[in-house]
Image (cartoon, rainbow, N blue to C red):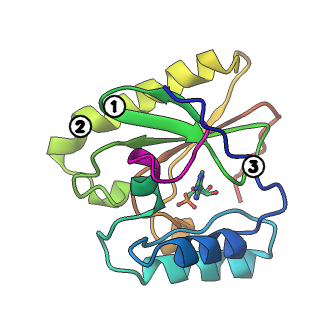
């Protein structure tokens, strides 16, 4: 577990985060994030991310390899959980497998991924407890351009610390 801290960029937009990823790594794929911009821009950012090669390294590989800092809240041999750089709730944590194994997104899941998929959700539960989200939380897995996925390394969003609304946007 690491205490490397990266301050959330509260004003960062999906486009800004996408741009920073493209600038810091041309091997990064499909990054970007957030939602300060219009829905149209959010979709454009997701579409831009989806146009990158399907299984190229992403910004999350740099976090796994400790090449860039992240505020890591949980780590074991198989999964890593860190605070989202552009939080959409008081608690917003990203949970990822350390080995992608073709899981660019949930839509690529196969039987061999059963164990890691379960582990990601179980880790979300552990981290929710660790974060004191005793009154509830939300789990999100964005998939593909229409799901506004921006980083093509499967990840679970753990959101909490505020009242969620339904339906989701
Ligand atoms: P998604 O849009 O579902 O693909 O989610 C990707 C998430 O990764 C977004 O919420 C981003 O804010 C987040 N993200 C991107 N780069 C970083 C980073 N360097 N550190 C932490 N979170 C990041």
Extreme residue toward the left, this view: 112
Q: Which residues are magenta?
A: 63-71
Residues under numbered marks 3 and 2 in contact, where contact means CB atoms less than 8 Å apart: no
Q: Tag on residue 114?
A: 2
Q: Tag on residue 8?
A: 3
Q: Is the residue 111 above or below the residue 30 in the image?
A: above
Q: Nearer the viewer, residue 150 or 118?
A: 150
The location of residue 76, given as percent across then percent down, is 37, 26
Q: Tag on residue 162?
A: none
For label 1, the SS is: helix
Residues under numbered marks 2 and 1 in contact, where contact means CB atoms less than 8 Å apart: yes
Residues under numbered marks 3 and 1 in contact, where contact means CB atoms less than 8 Å apart: no
**Structural distance between the alpha carbons of marks 2 and 1:** 6 Å
Per the image, is 39 magenta?
no
Mark 3 vs mark 2: in front = 3
Q: Quadrant of residue 107?
A: bottom left
For label 2, the SS is: helix
**Structural distance between the alpha carbons of marks 3 and 2:** 32 Å
The location of residue 155, given as percent across then percent down, is 46, 48
Question: Which residue appears at 44% of the width and 36% of the height?
Answer: 80
Q: What residue did someone put label 1 on?
A: 118
Q: Is the residue 163 above or below the residue 76 in the image?
A: below
Image position of 165 (left or right of 106): right
**Structural distance between the alpha carbons of marks 3 and 1:** 28 Å
């Amino acid at each position: 577990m690491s205490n490397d801290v990266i301050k959330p960029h509260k004003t960062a937009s999906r486009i800004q985060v996408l741009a920073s990823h493209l600038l810091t790594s041309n091997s990064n794929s499909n990054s970007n994030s957030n939602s300060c911009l219009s829905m149209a821009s959010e979709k454009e950012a997701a579409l831009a991310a989806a146009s990158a090669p399907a299984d190229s390294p992403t910004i999350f590989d740099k976090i796994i390899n400790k090449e860039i800092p992240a505020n890591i809240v949980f780590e074991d041999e198989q999964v890593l959980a860190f605070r989202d750089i552009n939080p959409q709730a008081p608690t917003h944590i990203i949970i990822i497998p350390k080995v992608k194994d073709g899981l660019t997104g949930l839509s690529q899941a196969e039987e061999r991924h059963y164990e890691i998929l379960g582990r990601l959700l179980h880790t979300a539960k552990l981290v929710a407890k660790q974060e004191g989200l005793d009154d509830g939380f939300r789990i999100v897995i964005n998939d593909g351009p229409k799901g506004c996925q921006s980083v093509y390394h499967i990840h679970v969003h753990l959101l909490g610390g505020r009242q969620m609304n339904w339906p989701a946007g």
